[in-house]
Image: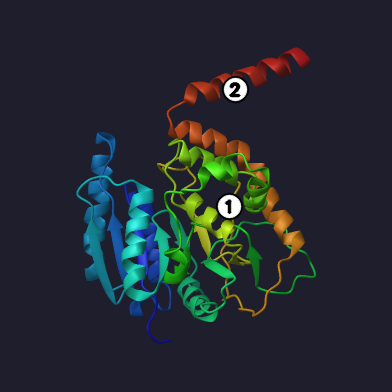
Amino acid sequence: MKNLVPIAIFVYSRPEHTRNMIESLAKNNLAKESNVYIFSDNAKQEKNVNDVKKVREYIDEIPAMNYFKTVTITKAEKNKGLAKSVIEGVTELINKYGKVIVIEDDLILSKYYLEYMNEALEFYEKDNRIWSISGYNSQIEIPKNYRKDIYLGYRGCSWGWATWKDRWNTVDWYVKDYKKFKHNIHRRRKFNKGGPDMAQMLDAQMNNLIDSWAIRWCYEQSKQNKFTIYPVKSLVINQGLDGSGTHSGVTKNFDTLLTNKIPKLEKNLILDKKITKSFYNKFNSGIKQTIIEILTILGMDNIIRLYKSKKKNIKEVQN
């Protein structure tokens, strides 16, 4: 395979997660032929300083490990936050190379991950229906008569994904039409086809309650009526839903297993309604957890405790 797609890796303050991710990526057959670009954000708070230092000490050692063809490291002087880091890093690479594979520090990757992502980016590049490629899939219910290795989804995924310049550069990161969207039931329902949490997350983003590039990315996808390619069996595990991340809580709702083969790509895929419903229900079951995670990020743990306390008191009265 010629001209492998560059890999953008975003790291912050989790040295063990970062090490696990790099070692899993290095086991890929195409690793030694791939150019890797590591973007290291700086500490936001004093409590993060030591861990950011450890991460940077580790990534400085990676070039000498000969895991990859080349390793380019960019260290932010000041904290940017994940959203700005990803938007700026991806934009830089995608404008130069036309496409990019994106990985964050909390992922574990199948040894077939790079082969699948490179092949899919080439295979679907001229298919204007396709917005992005996902390497991750949760353990949703797949119909027994569904024989394909991939399927179409309404929602982009931020856990080991890839896209092209002509898609990425159409995004309005300021969401200038949000006022029209905010109270438009039709547009909110359409956006929520990818999960019942979508519109609420965009509301949270636009009210500065969260800092997410992904929800804005997904919003543009919805507006343009495009799809994400998902593997039926995942090539990515998220090891970061353990409370260690800045933007994640603790949940097992999205646990999955790694596939031991490369998914076969298909032309002219048709949206499968049963899979779409199963995908939606996965996020429906996790929506309460998502709200709790947002409140935790905001330091509003007292609201969570009040909610749990009221719920406990109701149960005691019922008994």
Element type at mark 2: helix
Q: Residues within 10 Å of mark 2 (few under 14, many from 20)?
A: few
Amino acid carrying label 1: it is Asp
Please tell me in which quadrant of the rendered image residue 38 appears. bottom left
- Residue furthest out toward the right: 145
**Camera-side residue: 67 or 127?**
127
**Camera-side residue: 89 or 239?**
89
Quarter holding the N terminus?
Answer: bottom left
Q: Residue 113: x and y, percent?
A: 49, 71
Please tell me in which quadrant of the rendered image residue 233 appears. bottom right
In this image, 316 relative to 94: left or right? right
The residue sitting at 47% across, 40% down in the picture is 206
Q: Where residue 255 is drawn, which disc sits there?
A: 1
Element type at mark 1: loop
Q: Residue 97: x and y, percent?
A: 35, 75
As measured in the structure, the alpha-carbon distance from the residue carrying label 2 to the one carrying label 1 is: 26 Å
Amino acid carrying label 2: it is Tyr
2 or 1: tag closer to the N-terminus: 1
Quarter holding the C terminus?
Answer: top right
